[in-house]
Image (tube, rainbow, N blue to C red):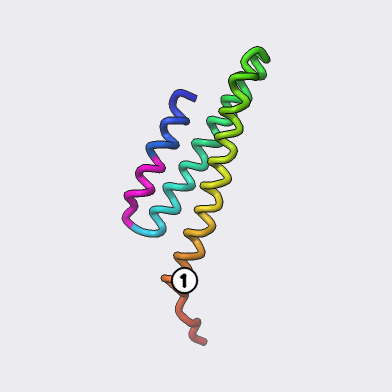
């Protein structure tokens, strides 16, 4: 958790400084993976000791909301990338 949570933030910053639309999407996918890993470690912590549940629940909810935002952003970025880079017609 000590590595995955800050990594999500660092990769989001890198996504904002992207070199291309594809780079932006790839960096956001890394953010999604790191947030998912953070959620795993939060679940794991509660499984080890339920006493941590009250402190973990708000963090877990926040991570879940962030993943929803990132997944939505990836979808939007893909749509925008298709608009700016349409596939050329296939020749037969």
SS class of the residue under badge 1? Answer: helix
The picture quadrant where one finds residue 53 is top right
State the image coordinates of residue 35 (x, y, percent, origin top left): 52, 36
> As drawn, is 28 to the left or to the right of 58?
left
Number of dots carrying numbers: 1
Q: Quadrant of residue 58?
A: top right
The x, y position of residue 17, in whole percent, is: 32, 49
Q: Nearer the viewer, residue 54 or 78?
A: 54
Which residue is at a point 42% across and 47% down the rendered structure image?
Answer: 27
Prevailing SS of the magenta stretch: helix
Q: Is residue 83 above or below residue 77?
A: below
The boundaries of the magenta stretch are 11-19
Q: Nearer the viewer, residue 75 or 65?
A: 65
Residue at image position (58%, 25%) is: 42
Q: Position of residue 71 (x, y in %)?
A: 55, 49
- Residue at 55% in and 52% down: 72
Which residue is at a point 50% across and 54% down the rendered structure image? Answer: 74
In terms of depth relative to the viewer, which is nearer, 54 or 23? Answer: 54
Furthest-bottom residue in view? 92
Q: Which residue is mark 1?
A: 83
Residue 76 versus residue 30 in the image, above or below: below
Q: Residues within 10 Å of mark 1 (few under 14, many from 20)?
A: few
């Amino acid at each position: 958790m000590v590595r995955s949570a800050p990594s999500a933030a660092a990769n989001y910053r890198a996504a904002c400084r992207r070199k291309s639309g594809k780079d932006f999407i790839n960096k956001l996918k890394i953010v999604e993976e790191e947030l998912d890993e953070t959620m795993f470690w939060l679940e794991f912590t509660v499984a080890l000791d339920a006493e941590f549940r009250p402190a973990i629940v708000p963090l877990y909810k926040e991570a879940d909301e962030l993943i929803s935002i990132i997944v939505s952003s990836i979808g939007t970025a893909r749509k925008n990338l298709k608009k700016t880079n349409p596939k050329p017609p296939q020749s037969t």
